[in-house]
Amino acid sequence: MSKQSWLVLIAVAAAVRLMLAWFITDFVLVDDAYITLRYARNAADSGALVYNHGEAVFGVTSPLWGFVTWGLMAIAGTAHIATVVIGLGVLLWSLAAARLVDLVPDRARGLTLAVFLCAPVFVDNQMLGMETPLFVWLAVEAMAAALSGAMRRAAFWTGLLVVARPEGVLFAPALLFAASASEGRGLTASVRELTRPVPTALLLTPGLLWIGFALSRYGTVLPQSMVAKSGWNSEHYDSLGTALHLWLSLARLTFVPFVDYLPALLGHAVTAALVASTVWITRANLRRGTAFSRAWLIVYGVYMAFYLAGKGATEASWYAVPSSVALLLAAGPALPERVDTARRGLASAVAAALMLLSIALVQKRAPLLQSYVDGYGACASALEALDRPHSERVLIGEIGVFGFQTEHLVIDVGALVSPEVLPIKNARRSLLAMARETDASWLVISDIALERNFYPSVGVVWENAAEREWLESSPVLAHERDKRLIWLGESERDPNDRPPLPDR
C-alpha cells in the first residue's frame, strides 16, 4: 500500500475513535484530567497556573500538558474543553501513527498500526484527557529524528519530552543509542554530535525554562503531585519484588482490560502468556531486529526499569504504564521473520477484533466516568446553590470533577495539591481529624467509605465511635446513582446545624 493509503486508514481509525467518545462516553474525561483543567481554567482567568487561587502549588505531573491545556482553555473556554482535549489526544496519536508508517518495514506495518490504533489500552488512553498521547507522539518524533541522523530535531523533541513527563529525561541517553544505530555511526560520534552547542541548547532549553518558571512561581521544580506520591508509595513499594507485583497487576489491566469478563484464574493466565510472549519477541528483536526496533527496545527496557526500581521517586500509575506499552509496541517492526504480517487480511482481522474489544472496554468504563461527573458534580452544584463564600475550604478525596465545577478552595485528601495534608496523611490520621487540622468547612464523602471505614489515600475515615456517629448522622445526601451515594457534609465551622467534630 502507498503512504497515502495508510494515511487514509489512520484518518478513518481516528474518526472511529472520535465516534466512540461521542456516542458512548459523551466526551466525559477521567477524574484526574479535570485537575489539570482546573489549573488551566484558573490560568486562563487570572494568568496564574494554580489549583486554588492564592495558593502557589503546582500539582500537575506534566508541566507541558498543563501549558497546552492552558492554551486550549483560553481559546475554547470551559463549555467544550473536554471535547477539544479528546480531539487533540486522537490527533496526536494519529500523528504518531503516521510517523510509524515511515519507520516500520512493509512486512510489519499492517499489524503494528492495527495494534497501535485499535488496541483497547491505546484507544482508552486517547479518551481520558491525560498527557499520554502527547508523550507518545513526542517520543516517536524524537526517535524518528535520531534514527535519521537529524540530531538537532531529535534534541528539540527530547527537550519537550523532559517537560511532558518526568521519565522524558530517559530519552537523552536513548537518543545516543538510536543515533549510533543509524548510518553506521558509532556511540562516541553520537555523543559528540548531541553535545554540540545547538543540539545541547535545544535539549536543555525547555527544561531550563520550566525550572525558571517553577522557581519564580512555586519555589520548587518538583510537582506537589510527585512529592505526595513519593511520600505515600515509599511506605508500600520499597522493594523490587513488591514493585514487580504491582506492575504485573497493572499489566493485567493495560494489556488485556477485557479479562475482567473472564474468571480470575483464566485472566491471570492470559496476562502471564502475554508477558512471556513479550519477553520472547524482545529477545528475537535484539538478535535480528532493525536499528529502529533495537533502539526502541533499549528505551523500553530503561523505561520499565525506571518504574520497577524507582517507585519511591515516582508512581507507575495506571495512566503512565500504557506509555511504556506504547514504546514497546513501536519496537514491533522486528517481529520474528516467520511471522509474516503482510499476509492478506491478517492486519484487518486483528484491527477489527481489537476495535471490538476497545468498544467493549469503553462501554464498560463509561458508566464509571459518568458516575464521577454526576456524583461529584452534584456535590459542587449543591454547594454553589448555598451561595457560601468560595473562601470556605472543602476536603475531598477525588478533586477532579468537583474542583472543576466549583470555585471553592479545595483541600485534597491525597495531598496532590495540598502540601499541608501530607504529614497528616502519612500519619494515617482519620478523615475527620484531617478536616479539623486543615480548617475545612466542608467534606465530601461516599457511602462506600462509611461502610468500609476507608477513603482514598487515607487509612481510615473515623478513629473512634464518636467520629463514626457524627459521620453517620451529619452529612446530607447530595446525589444517588446506581446505589452509589455521594455525601456533602459540614464540619465544625457551621456548628448551628451540625454538632462539632469529636476530639480524637
Image (tube, helix red, strand yellow):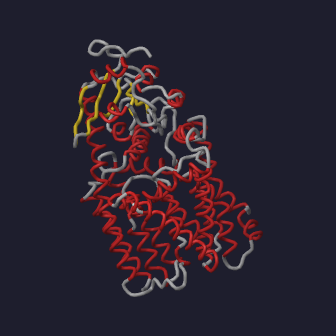
Residue 19 sits in quarter: bottom left
Q: Where in the figure is residue 206, as x and y percent of width and height?
A: 60, 52
Does 2 sit above or below residue 266?
A: below
- Please tell me which residue lies in front, 211 or 297: 297
Would residue 221 appear left or right of 189 to someone viewing this image? left
Q: Residue at x 38, y 76 (%)?
A: 350
Which image quadrant: the N terminus? bottom left
Which image quadrant: the C terminus? top left
Q: Where in the figure is residue 138, as x and y percent of width and height?
A: 53, 62
Q: Residue at x 64, y 48 (%)?
A: 208
Looking at the image, can residue 32 be seen? yes
Q: Residue at x 39, y 80 (%)?
A: 347
Would residue 293 appear left or right of 136 to someone viewing this image? right
Q: Where in the figure is residue 344, as x and y percent of width and height?
A: 39, 87
Does 334 sit above or below residue 46?
A: below
Q: Residue at x 43, y 44 (%)?
A: 36
